[in-house]
Structures are given as C-alpha cells and as structure tokens.
Amino acid sequence: LVRFVWMQRGGAYPERTEIAAYQHGIFPRSESVVAATRDLERGRTSEEAVEAAFSDDRDAFVALQRGGGLGFFSDGLLRWQDLFRPLVEASTGLDADGLARWFDNNAFYRTPDVSAPPVLSVEPAVFAGLDALPRPRMATLPSPYLFFRAARGLGVVEAAEALLRPAAEFLVARACALIHLQEPWIGFHGIEDAEWASFEKALGVLTEGLSATVVLHVFYGDAEPLLDRLRRLPVAAVGVDLVETDAGAVGTHWETGLLAGCVNGRSTVLEDVDATAEVVARVTERAGPPRLFLSSASELELLPQTLAAEKVRLLGAVTARAREVLSA
Amino acid sequence: MKALLTHEIGSLAKPGWRVKAYAGRPVPPEDVNDARRWGEQLGVEGHEDLLALLREAPLPRERRAEVARWSSVYGVRFLEAAGLDAVYDGEQQRSEMYNWAVTHATGFDARGSVRSFDNKYYTKAAVTGPVTLAEPYHDAEFLLLREMARAELKVPVTGAYTIGAWSFDEYHHCEDDLRLPAAIRREHRQQGRRSLVLELATRLIRPNLESLINLGARWLQVDEPGASTEPDELDLFVESFNASVDGLNAVFSTHLCFSDYELFFPAIEAMSGCQQYCVGFANDDARDLGVSESARPGYQIIKRFRDLPYRPALGVGVLDIHTDFIEPPELVRDRILYAVEVFGDPARIHVTPDCGLRTRTWEVAFGKLRNMVEGTRLAESALGLPT
C-alpha cells in the first residue's frame, strides 16, 4: 500500500520520499447512526440496533478508505463522543465535566477534569473495534499539549505518562502502525516559549521505544512561526494545515516526515484535485521529507457524512495525482 | 422590567406525543397518558380534546397543525406553572432554532447532520445564493401565543451571526485554492463571512423582527449562541446585531452561552441597543452554597457586564442545562445574591437557565424551573424585595 516515489531532483533532498495518505480524527456518523443514537436516547430502539448501525458505518468507512487508495486504515473513531472521552472514561482520577467549545467551531467537548492523580487503568472499550480493520492500521489521539490545555488540572508530561503512553501501547497491541496526534491548540492559540521543553519531554515519553510511527499534526492555524521548533520534536512526522499555512512557508531540508493537511475539513466546497496536488508536490519538492503523509487539514467531523466521504475520495485522488507529479 | 425577573431562554423538548402525531405516526398509550398527566398537572384547559385527537393517530397531514398548537399550549402552561414572569412556548412550533430560520429563507440548501456534542446533532445548511426572507417565520406562532399566554411574552429569534457561523458558505466564499497565499485566502474568507452575516442581518433577521413588532411583539431576544465562535469576529457580531435592531421600537436582548465570555469585551461596548444580556454561567459554577467570590467561580466574568458603558440588565444563568441535577433553591438563591452583590442593583439582575432546556426531560426541566423560581423568592426575601 505504501509506494516509493523516486524524485528527480538535485540538491540536498533525499532521493526518495515515501508517500501515504490516511484520514485522521473522528469521522462523521451517517444519518442512520445519528437516528439510531437519538432513538436509543428516546427509548425507541435497542442497543443491538445501534451496534448494527455503527458496524455498518465502520464497514462503509473501511470501504471508503480502500476505494480511495489510502495507506492506513482508521476506524473513524465513530463511537468517540469527543477526542478525550474514551480516555477519560477508561481512567481513574479523571471525569468528563461541562461542555467547552472546540476552538472556533459549533462543536463542543466535555472538559476532562482531574480529581485525583489520573491513570489510564484499563484499555478504552472503543479500542476493541480496531480488530475489525484491515492492516496497516492507524489511530488518533490528542497531543499531550492539547490534552493539558483542554483539561482542568492536568500536566502536559502527566498527560503523556499517565494517559497517552498507556493508550498508545494499547493501540500498538491492536496492531496500529501509525498514531496521529491532533494538536490544534498551538495552531490556534500558540504556545509559550517556556512550554516547549515540557511539550518536547511529553512527546518523548509518548514516543520513545514505541513500536509505531507517531505524527504530530498542528492545525487550525498558521504553522509557519512554529515550524523550526516543531521539526525538532521527537516524532516521526509533523503535520501542517495548508488551509491556514502558506505552502511556501513550509520550508526546506526537512529531516523529519511531513504531513500535508491539504483537504479543507470545514468547507463543503470540494477542492480542485490538480491544483491541490500541485501544491502538495511543490511543498514536497522544497521540503524533501523522508516521508510524506497526506490527510485532511483538520478532522472531517465538522462536515456532514456524505460530504466528508467526498473529501476522503478527493484525498485519495490528490494523493494519486501528487505521486504522478512527483514522479514525472 | 422588574428586579429579579424570571424567564426561560427558548426551547423545551417536544413531548413524545407531539413528535409522533406530528410525524403522522401512531401515538402509543404511554404517550397519551403523558399528555393526560401533564395536562392535569399544568391545568391545560380542554386537554381532553387533545387526548381524543391523539387516540385518532396516525393523523392525516391536515390535522397535524392541531397537534403543534396543543404542544404550544402545553409549553406556555408549563412555563407559567413553573412560575416564570415571562414565557414563550418552548419553541414547540419550530423544528429547531437554526433549521427553522433557514428553511424560511431563500439562498440555503440543507447539507446534512453535524454533531454539536455527544449524540446531539443539527442539520447544517450551505448558503448557495443571495439570502432573503421568504416569509416572516415567527408571526403565526406569536399570534397564537398572544391569544393563549397569561404571562408576558418574550420572542426568541435566532441572530444573524449565529446563522452565518452555523452555515457553510458556498456563495460568498466559494474557493479555497491553496496556490494562493494564505493571507489572501484568509482575507477572502473574512470578506465572504462579513458579506454573509450582514446580508443575514439586513435581509433576513431585521424584516422578521419588523414583522413581529408590527404584530405587537415588545420583547425580542436575539439568540446568539454562536457569537464567540470566531474570536476575531466579535466586531462583526456586534455590527450584525446593530444592523438587525437599530431604530426598531421594542426591547431587545441577546442570549450568549458556553463561551469564553472575556472574548466579548470590549466589542459589545458598541452594542448599546441591547437592553439585556442572557448569559449561561451555571455550567462552570460549583454546586456548593455560598455567596463569596470564591464560592461562585462560574460568575467571575459578570463584573465585565456590570461595567459596560450603558446599563443593560444581566439575565444570570443559574441552571446547568446539560445535566439532570436539579439545582436546589438555596443554590439558585446564592447565585442570584452573588450577582446582585456584584451589580449593586437588583433591578439589573434577571434570572434564567443557562440556555434552552430542550435536552432535558419535562420532569427534569420542570423541577429545575420550579426551583429557579423558588430560589428567586428566597433571594427576594433575603434582599427585602417584594415578591
């Protein structure tokens, strides 16, 4: 599933860049699941019917990823109520509290609230569903810095040690070869200079010796002012939101992998495949990363499911076209 | 308006009998019994006629409006029985605050369900052409409620900024060519948003408000739960509010919820046409009793509303609408007393839930509202105000 494209370039760029696309984050539920979960809350359907609807959605999402030629399979986090909830529910010392806005969106998460030293004490129940996926598998987790900022009373290193590293190990045990860390906080709000050290330490705790590729994806903001620091963090690849970041600002001579967030996850307008692939190719040629991942610029959960599916197909088409451009 | 005036924010859940009968489905006996029980408890006059109607379900399309009318009667009596000073009908005539507005406008096409939180969704539309008011969309319900309500009416109307923020825009901003510099693309997005929101204010919301005022509406609550969605667009939110209401003869208030309220300052200093802000705070407050600053962490921001250059009232959210926890009257009392202490003037404090109660059952919503009113009575007593 992973192709190698020899790039006809000179200079300091590596001779080959490994290219793969995947879809990170929570994928929107179908209208059938929306209706089923609503009906369950109103006592109009059974748990079994809801389970069946979720299974249908998962199977459809797998088929969508396969049809798009994506390189890793996700379960779409379809049962996740928000990016933190399964981790919160599987942890002691952590509760899901009041609603907080998910950045500048009409979507909300429940604030993780620390009441005692938190420990991810059992495997989150939703991870069991990963067994139904083809391989290679990928999963999404919140970045430790996002977790620290979104929660109340949680430290950034503590988030990595007590929650995210155990979660990542559970995911590796479920054969996840790639773990995508969503980091919209520093894209949207930025990060204090003094906080980089603890962020780096937290990522080290999370990634050291872990048998999976870890990608840190900064979105909902311009990554340009952050890139020098991001590229030195202990992760296999750094993701950039190209909807918010100038393609020309991504830079050159990347020694770490690059994730090009090239499909707008918050707009129903479908991108032009050739134009988007051209930008991805230009960024790749300049940056010369050893590995290139393509994905949506932010999660697709904020789109209706049918349009999100179109975006996944489009991601596959952009990836294929970018390969052609880069190999030409 | 009176000191410590009590009112709701907008929505109540639609009863099972209303949902099923309106959808043309049979109504099972337990839902008919539910209609009977609430009809008796709320003293709904003639509710036996509703029960007879429900027993005929499934109903033909031409009879379903009767069900919606009954639902409004129940909604009004529900809020009146809870003891509120100002009421509406829990938005029983409307599909939902966003969808109801856009389906009565031109220029929108539905795109599908998008999650708000947990298992709660809304149908999100895309703007695909010029937006105009197709027909005034609250007139019929206002005329209906004016006939039946015993308490003062306050009409909730979804605001322009929120409708804009909750819509996709494929008309004013329809390209996202990554080959352009990011700054140019950002500027195009901002221009598109500004065009859309001001178009909504002047061509959809304002004519709708004018129509209500012509029918006799005197208090119009412009709901803006999405107002702080884009922190760098607070000035646009204010501009859209002003464009919606400037020069119109009525009391205008606005409802804000679940935001970082600090973001609204200083932008809302220019929103002097707003005579009352209704704001949710209980969601972030402690449940312990107490009137000290440390006891009321969810209410620290209210000082900023107090210090606005004009003197709006503050509708203080005292009920967390996301939980089934029934706030004891004493907790409501202490939240009110803290707010009065900060403002130094009970006439500028009103008492409300954080937001609409549509996500709660009627049992829970009624328990919360009854305790809100009882807590207000306790606060009035503590302050030596007439009850």
Image (cartoon, coloured by chain):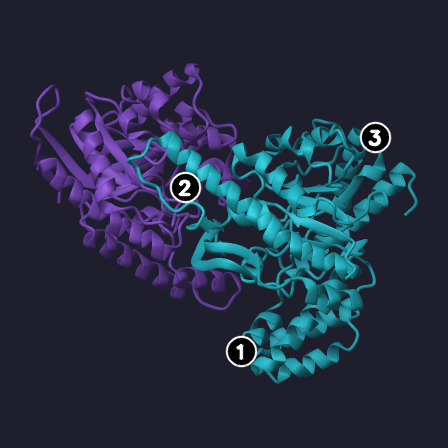
Chain in cyan colour: B
Give the labeled residue for mark 3.
B344
* Residue B282 falls in image quadrant: top right
In this view of the protein, which residue sits in the foreground, A144 or B274? B274
Residue B10 appearing in the image: no
Q: Colour of chain A?
A: purple
From the viewer's perspective, tell me whether residue B6 is left or right of residue A15.
Answer: right
Could you tell me which secondary element the residue under label 2 belongs to?
loop
Residue A195 appearing in the image: yes
Q: Which mark is residue B153?
A: none
Q: Where is residue A75 in the image (x, y as percent from the top left)?
A: 29, 50
Q: Are marks 1 and 3 on the same chain?
A: yes
Q: Which mark is residue A83?
A: 2
Q: Position of residue B314 (x, y in %)?
A: 75, 39
Three-letter amino acid code at the position of disc 3:
Gly
In the rendered view, would you say A115 is above or below B24?
A: above
Label 1 with label 3: CB-CB less than 8 Å: no
The chain holding disc 3 is B
Give the labeled residue for mark 1.
B25
Q: Earlier in the sequence, mark 1 or mark 3?
A: 1
Local crowd at mark 3 within 10 Å, few (<14), some, or many (≥20)?
Answer: few
Three-letter amino acid code at the position of disc 2:
Leu
The chain holding disc 1 is B
In the rendered view, would you say B304 is above or below A321?
A: above
Could you tell me which secondary element the residue under label 3 belongs to?
loop
Labels 3, 2: front one: 3
